[in-house]
Amino acid sequence: MNAAQDPAPDGGGNPVRGSGASRSTGEAPSPVPGGGNPVRGAGGGAGGGAGASPALGVRTGLGHARRAAALAWTSGRGHVVGQVVLACAAGLVPVLTAWFTKLVLDGLTGPGATVSALLPYAVALLVLGALAGTVPHLAGYAEAELERRVNLLARDRLYTAVNRLPGLVRLENPGFQDRLHLAEQASRSGPGRLVTSALGLAQAGIVIGGFLATLMTVSPVAAGLVLLAVVPLVRVHLDLSREQAAMLWSTGHGQRRELFFARLLSMPHAAKEVRLFGLGDFFRDRMLAELRAVSAEQRRVGLRQLRGQGALALLAAAIAGAGLVWIIGEAVAGRATVGDLSVFVAAVAGTQGALAAGVRRLAAAHQSLLLFDHYEAVRGAEPDLSLPSHPMAASALGHGVELRDVWFRYGPEQPWILRGVTLSIPFGRSLALVGLNGAGKSTLVKLLCRFHDPERGSILWDGVDLRDLDPAALRERVGAVFQDFGEYDLSVAENIAVGDLSALGDHPRVEAAAVRAGADAMIRRLPHGYDTLLTKVFFRGSAGDEEQAGVTLSGGQWQRVALARALLRDRCDLMILDEPSSGLDPHAEHEVHTILREHRTGRTTLLISHRLSAVRDADAIAVLADGRIAELGGHDELVRAGGRYAELFEIQARGYATAVAP
């Protein structure tokens, strides 16, 4: 194991690897093709946040509509066909009802009216009435079922795309998180709602076209009066729908903030500090401030809608009234029948109602398209790590892992975290990494797991650059206890088995890992042993059964479970232990490090700890300071050198000596 001298700013030495990398100066290139922010902004990639414009181009909108329709068709063809049939029926029923009502009225007022002559019309009205009562319910069920089916398929595809992202670059980007939040909303109902909205527009078109065609048979003038009422209705409703969509976009960030503060007030993970520090009123006020701002914007748009719709209603009433006066005059003069009068009244009301419903559907479709744009952006997001067209399989480690002149930062505007780190971990040996907080230890772990790529330099697995390997295959050969390990709302057995899903359901193997981690006795004391649910948020079975409630573990107990999770992957080539005993008491810490010493014998291991007593028996110890390797050697060697390691060790030893002094 060797540490490199601090390089000249141009790096020198190794060829620079990575997307768009150059060997020019100390300013390393952008980590993604094209430079700039690794996650593209709105309109291009998957990183745009809530500040992006809600406008969609016609071509983009049509493309989204086609893909949403294809998604709905794949989810449930029969339900789509059923909704088309029901939409056509719902559009024809009011038109046919008005027409048969006209025929009945004309027959009653005409000469020679008989029951037998009017009976077919009456039967038709009865059938139409039955359809009018049942079709909306059938359509509502079909719409809800289609949205449920689309939700399943869309969420499957969305999170399949998220899982395909090989690194953490996008998931650590707030803009991408905003898009992902909106994409999740879109996946729930967006594609299905686009289809139902389109069918609703078609239904409205059938109603309007049917009434206009009917009126044309009565009087072209009557049809013209109805069209005259339609024009302002369309204009006002479209303007209001655009403003509604813009309002939903502009208030999205505030709504998410309001939800964030509400969750702080209600979720167990924050309850201790909220109660202890008296933060309840503080977070409630923040929540209400966001809610008031959102409500104010909604109120402003609502008042504009009220004024616009009120003026529109008066205009429509005036036009309809004028038409009614005209048709009454025509009926008195004998140029129109009572049936014509009834058709006119039904046509005006039906056309205006259908148009209003159609515009609402149009607004819903527009909003669904905006959300679907985020869904498509996330699904189409390019990999956040450079991937070769033919990645190599990660072979069993035979020689070791080597870092060569590794430079890294989290963004072009961010400070350098690692500055020319060169290290090697020979096969079967252990390397301990120590340093102050912020020195770059956890970042180096991320690079070894290939969650990020170096901007300069390379990391080699038996001489092969990690960027030439399949990331999934590489990670199968790495085991780890992370400092910020996951605490999953699952059973104890599942919390351990997620370290290697092949052990899911293999209780002997899970229990063996728990025994090696010193967690078995603790687990068996839990109410349901390995089947105990580790959460206070969910039930094991039916809600309301207190016996099914889970438990919460202490930090040290969770540490044991996380250690068992890592030890379950006992066939890995590289074991990374990032503060594996940070939550343990001294006795438990000693026990755990005894276990780990036995486990890592003959294994390639990277051990990170602030407690130098835990790393002194490592084969080599590297001191990381300001992103560079400041010292490298064995424990005794570094203590004799009197450098940073010796200083840190002396501070910790002095603290223990003071604590036990008489």
Image: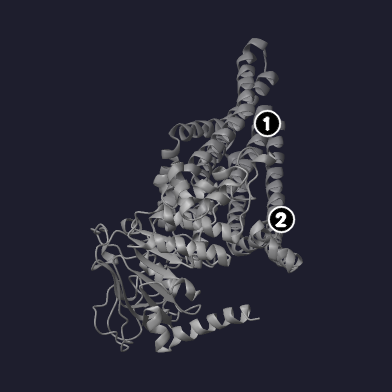
**In this rendering, position of residue 388 left or right of residue 183:** left
Q: Position of residue 9 (x, y in %)?
A: 32, 88
Q: Which residue is mark 2?
A: 306
Percent across and percent down for residue 244 are 61, 57
On-image quarter of the C terminus: bottom right
Residue 45 can be seen in this image: no
User: What's under tag 1, amino acid-wise?
Assistant: Ser
The picture quadrant where one finds residue 293 is: bottom right
**x, y percent for residue 281:** 76, 66
Badge 1 local density, few (<14 within 10 Å), some, or many (20+)? Answer: some
Q: In the rendered view, tell whether residue 521 sits above or below residue 653.
A: above
For the N terminus, which image quadrant? bottom left
Label 2, secondary structure: give it.
Answer: helix
Q: Nearer the viewer, residue 655 or 414?
A: 655
Lateral position of residue 224 relative to residue 606, left or right? right
User: Total label count?
Assistant: 2
In this picture, residue 225 sits left or right of residue 436: right
Mark 2 burial class by Cα count in 10 Å: few <14, some 14-19, many 20+: few
- Label 1 sits on residue: 342
Distance from label 1 to label 2 (Cα)? 30 Å
